[in-house]
Image (tube, rainbow, N blue to C red):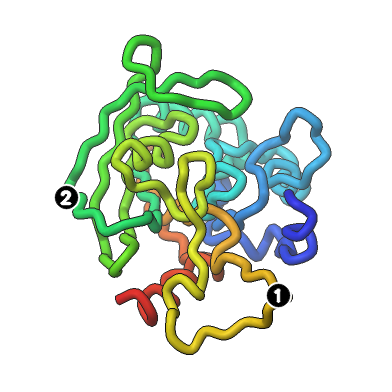
Amino acid sequence: MQENENRLFKFPKFQDLIIFEDDNLIVINKPPFVASLDDRTGGEINILRLAKKYHADAQVCHRLDKDTSGILLIAKNPETYRLVSIEFERRRVDKNYHAIIGGTHTFDNLLVDLPILNQGNKNVSIDRANGKAAETIFNSIRYFKHFTLVNCKPITGRMHQIRIHLATQHAAIVGDSMYRGKPVYLSQIKKRGFTMSKDQEELPIMKRFALHAHSVRFSIDGKEYAFDAPYPKDFATLLKQLEKFDS
């Protein structure tokens, strides 16, 4: 986490992240700027550590990129972890992400089927010869003059899958510099009445890429689970500004 993010971002209590809990499962709405699991250095705060402080046997069932917000499943015992893992492996977990992308794009059940090669160190590429199968379905939800809110349904679960698949459609997620996505500034969309002192540096409306794990559906031992996660403040603020100044 960058130094300015450390100052600006206050991590809430783990209990405040929980949107569902029973004897076997915890479902949270993960905030941005927090890793799901331990990194190599082991120095940063992450969801796994916080979950284990809350429940000693907790295991994170999947991961979200550090900057991605939204639904994260945490098992409270080894058997639930095994069952949820099987559902993910057999592609029976219905996941939906919302992304704000640059440009106006009409996606109507667009299937992007491009293999992804994990080159290590969080670097991935599209590689038809050596990559692993990767499929994502995209649907446009709302159009603005210069941006689009998109629903992203990953069928597989490759690293950076949604991000790189959108980039192949010339529709990078705003703020996603790794895939040439540009941040959104208020001066860019509010061209009238925007003033700023000369010595003040304008910051983007959203200080990360605009991707949120919005909903998940799955079943364990015949019991159906379905969850939705509200947008975090930064994602909601960007949408509000686009609705106000870019509609």
Categorize mark 2 by other alpha carbons within 10 Å: few (<14), some (14-19), many (20+): few
Report the side of 216 relative to 61 (left or right). left
Lower position in the chain sequence, tag 1 or tag 2 = 2
Residue furthest to the front? 198
Percent across and percent down for residue 210 are 48, 56
Check disc 1 and report the residue beneath it.
200
| Three-letter residue code for mark 2 | Asp
The image shows residue 89, relative to residue 10, as above or below, that is above
Q: Nearer the viewer, residue 223 or 214?
A: 214
Residue furthest to the bottom? 193
Percent across and percent down for residue 4 are 76, 60
| Three-letter residue code for mark 1 | Gln
Q: Quadrant of residue 122?
A: top right
Q: Residue at x 55, y 27 (%)?
A: 123
Residue furthest to the left? 108
Percent across and percent down for residue 114 are 30, 26
Q: Residue at x 39, y 11 (%)?
A: 130
The image shows residue 117, relative to residue 236, as above or below, that is above
Q: Nearer the viewer, residue 31 or 2?
A: 2
Check disc 2 and report the residue beneath it.
108
